[in-house]
């Protein structure tokens, strides 16, 4: 699933180079949102600090 | 104010610098046989997202929207790096991976994401907003840098697929899933 994040940014970059800005921004947004989701999913360990 | 051409060159240097950071990550991964954990991979995603923001400035010209994209991406990466730093900040809680020049990769990540945010702040002070009909000509070296970044991103996608396949990456990976 993590591969998908890199693929989304890859498509965003290629779309940018091909001049397809709207498509490029869409893929960037999807990558960022999914990235935040996966960060939330993997941030499970308890921190050994008290704030 | 700096000229837009110079600002685009500075952004291209940012893309190049982050490509080198990712290449170093690759080099360490294969020479030290240390597989990146999910949080490490998310930091790499942060780097490619920041690279994408800088690339926008190179290819389409400097714009506030593009800097916004860099900032969102850098804050995402810094958040992930901070989480990993906090996991290991208390003595006795261990570390992940080998140190590079005395600091672990996640600490370097936090420094680099913070430097990106600082760089954007400085560039915003020096950038003149793009004029609507201004023609952008992407130079050969800028093109080369952008395509290098794209290749590095593709290599990362391939490497992560080798490590995790189409599944959720394990918290403490010890082998490449698709290589046995």
Image (spheres, coloured by chain):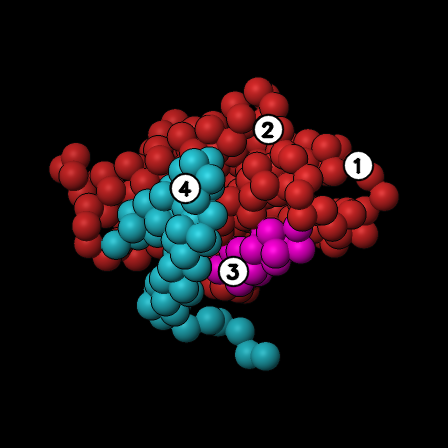
Foreground mark, 3 or 1? 1
Specify the farthest residue to the front: B133
Residue B165 seen in render: yes
CA distance separating discs 1 and 2: 15 Å
Mark 2 chain:
B
**Overall secondary structure of the magenta section:** helix
Label number found at residue B76: 3
SS of the residue under disc 4? helix
Residue B94 seen in render: no
Q: Which chain is red?
A: B
CA distance separating discs 4 and 1: 26 Å
Q: In the shown orientation, is residue B96 left or right of residue B172?
A: right
- Answer yes or no: are tags 4 and 1 on the same subunit: no
Q: Residues within 10 Å of mark 3 (few under 14, many from 20)?
A: many
Q: Which residue is mark 4?
A: A15
Q: Which residue is mark 1?
A: B3
Q: Which quadrant holds residue B168? A: bottom left
Point out residue B176 in the picture as x, y percentages from the top left corner.
22, 40
Q: Which residue is mark 2?
A: B138
Foreground mark, 3 or 2? 2
Specify the farthest residue to the right: B1
Image colour for chain A is: cyan
Lower sequence index among marks 3 and 2: 3
CA distance separating discs 4 and 2: 15 Å
SS of the residue under disc 1? loop
Mark 4 chain:
A
Point out residue B114 in the picture as x, y percentages from the top left corner.
65, 53
């Amino acid at each position: 699933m993590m591969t998908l994040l890199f693929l989304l940014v890859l498509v965003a970059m290629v779309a940018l180079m091909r001049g397809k800005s709207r498509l490029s921004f869409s893929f960037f947004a999807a990558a960022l949102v999914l990235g935040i989701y996966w960060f939330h999913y993997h941030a499970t360990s308890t921190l050994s600090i008290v704030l | 104010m700096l000229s837009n051409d110079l600002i685009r060159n500075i952004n291209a240097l940012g893309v190049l610098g982050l490509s080198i950071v990712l290449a170093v990550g690759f080099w360490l991964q294969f020479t030290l046989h240390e597989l990146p954990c999910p949080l490490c991979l998310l930091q790499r995603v942060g780097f490619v997202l920041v690279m994408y923001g800088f690339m926008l400035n190179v290819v389409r010209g400097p714009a506030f929207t593009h800097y916004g994209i860099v900032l969102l991406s850098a804050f995402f990466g810094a958040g992930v790096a901070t989480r990993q730093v906090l996991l290991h900040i208390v003595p006795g809680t261990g570390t992940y991976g080998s140190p590079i020049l005395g600091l672990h990769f996640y600490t370097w990540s936090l420094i680099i994401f913070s430097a990106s945010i600082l760089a954007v702040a400085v560039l915003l002070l020096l950038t003149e907003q793009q004029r609507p009909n201004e023609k952008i000509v992407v130079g050969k070296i800028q093109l080369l840098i952008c395509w290098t970044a794209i290749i590095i991103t593709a290599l990362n996608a391939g490497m992560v697929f080798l490590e995790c396949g189409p599944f959720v990456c394990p918290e403490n990976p010890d082998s490449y899933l698709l290589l046995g």
